[in-house]
Each structure stands twice: as C-alpha cells, then as structure tokens.
Image (spheres, grey):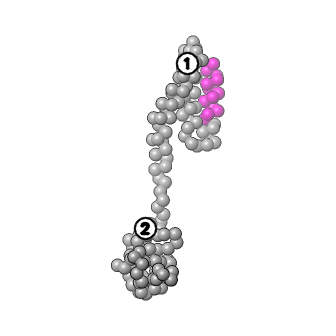
Amino acid sequence: MSYFWIALAVVLLIAECLTTQLISVWLGAGAAVTAILVAIFPSIGIPYQILIFLVLSAILLAATRPLVKKFLHKSKSNETNLDRLIGETAVVVEAINNVTGAGQVKIQGNYWSARSSDGSEIPVDTLVTFEKIEGNKAIVSIK
C-alpha cells in the first residue's frame, strides 16, 4: 500500500511544479510521510492511513505555508525607481495651471507633466518639491 502513497506524493509534487501555489507540496509531503509510516508499520489500516495523510498535510500546510508565502513575496514591492524622485527639487519650465492642465517641470534632466498639489498656479523658474506621482503626472508643491 505504500506504493500508492509514493505515487500520490509524486503526482502532487509534479502538480506543485506546474502550479506553484504552495498547496500541493504539503499534500505531497503528507503522502510521502504516510508512505514511510505504512512501510514501517504495514498493519496500519486504510482508514488510519487516510487520517494520517490528512492530519499531516493539514499540519504542514497550516504551519508552513504562511511563512513560506511571506518569505517568497517579501521582495515584492510597488516601489519603482521613480520613487527616488519624491522629495527632490524640480524647476518649473512651463507654468503650472491645474484648471487648464498645463504645466511641466524638469527634474534630474527629465521633463514631467506636472500639477500642483494644492491647485495653485506656479510660474516658470519656480523651485518646487516633487511630492508624488499620479499616473504620468508629477504632483509638486512650491518649496
């Protein structure tokens, strides 16, 4: 009967390789441990084998999946290289007027369409602080 559990473990581990959802791997591990237990204690009945498999899989899943998911997705971030511009000083090269949608700033050699954070008009050559990015627009305020 341990061959069944080994085959199930292999199938579940292959499924994990295809899906990478971190669920099948724990079921596969539960099946592998069940196979080992059945090989050591061949008198374990089928209902107990199923119970062992379910309990082991549930424990492995509950105990490790949140930790592994946290570790694997730790590096994911919404930050981009553009976030380094926040707080930097820019110069207005086209007067900013939120009503007409006009305005452009130059920061680190790049030109950005710009809007003022408080809705005020900002004249050319004014130094402004790059506050945030909304879509493809720089939101700025007078320094």
**Camera sees residue 27:** yes
What secondary structure is the stretch in magenta mostly built from? helix
Q: Which amino acid lies under the numbered mark 1 shown in the image of this protein? A: Tyr
Using the image as rendered, state which of residue 101 and residue 139 is in the foreground: 101
Residue found at the far bottom of this picture: 124
The tag earlier along the polypeptide, 1 or 2, is 1
Q: Quadrant of the N terminus?
A: top right
Q: Which residue is mark 2?
A: 84
Residue positioned most to the top: 43
User: Is disc 1 in contact with disc 2, using a CB cutoff of under 8 Å?
Assistant: no
Local secondary structure at mark 1? helix
The Cα–Cα distance between marks 1 and 2, rounded to whole angstroms, is 58 Å
Q: Which residue is mark 1?
A: 48
| In this view, 1 is above or below 136 | above
Residue at the spot 46% in from the left edge and 50% down from the top edge: 74
What is the residue that sits farthest to the front in this orientation? 99
Q: Residue at x 38, y 71 (%)?
A: 87
Q: Quadrant of the C terminus?
A: bottom left
Look at label 2 and name its amino acid.
Arg
